[in-house]
Amino acid sequence: MDPRTVFCPNADCLARGQRGAGNIVSHSRKRRRYKCTRCGQTFSERAGTLFAGLHSEPARVVRVVTLLAYGCPIQAIVQAYGLDERTVADWRDRAGRQCEAVQQAVV
């Protein structure tokens, strides 16, 4: 965990989006959380990503989303990885929302 590589995700924080500004400190190494010293908000290492709130390994989620992007049917992924159909659909939807958010921020 390196606080210099993350920024505060709080939309109301004056330091939002500023990496390496010295306002982020480690809040919990075990739970991998940070704290902004400007606004006082704590947040997860995965905040603002596709993986926020997920307990699955990121590599597994990326593999499943990649298969979906290449047109692999949900039912095939369910059988191959032993996942629930709703889980795969949720990961697909999360990835779509994340892609839309990145597109809006960049374009």
Image (tube, helix red, strand yellow):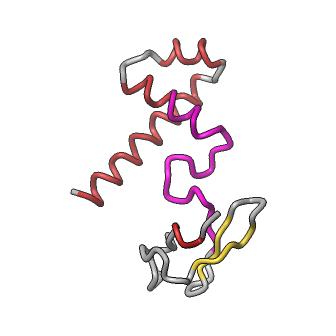
Q: Residue furthest left?
A: 107
Start-end of magenta stretch: 42-63
Q: Does the stretch in magenta take in 43?
A: yes
Residue at left offset 44%, top offset 23%: 67
In magenta stretch: residue 56? yes
For residue 97, side relative to residue 56 (left or right) = left
Relative to residue 47, is residue 25 depicted above or below? below
Where residue 103 appears, as percent x and y from the top left, is: 28, 52
80 or 5, nearer to the observer? 5
Q: Position of residue 25 (x, y in %)?
A: 64, 77
For the point 42% across and 24% down, the residue is 68
Residue 83 position (above or below residue 44):
above
Q: Does residue 31 appear to the left or right of 99 in the view shown?
A: right
Identify the residue shown where x is 42% and y is 16%: 72
Judging depth in this view, the residue of 92 and 60 nearest the camera is 60
Residue 59, quarter of picture: top right
- Looking at the image, residue 73 lies above or below residue 98: above
Q: Position of residue 65 (x, y in %)?
A: 46, 31
User: How many numbered discs?
Assistant: 0
Residue 75, position in %: x, y? 52, 14
Location of residue 83 (image quadrant): top right
Observer-nearest of 83 and 46: 46
Task: Give the quadrant of the N terminus.
Answer: bottom right
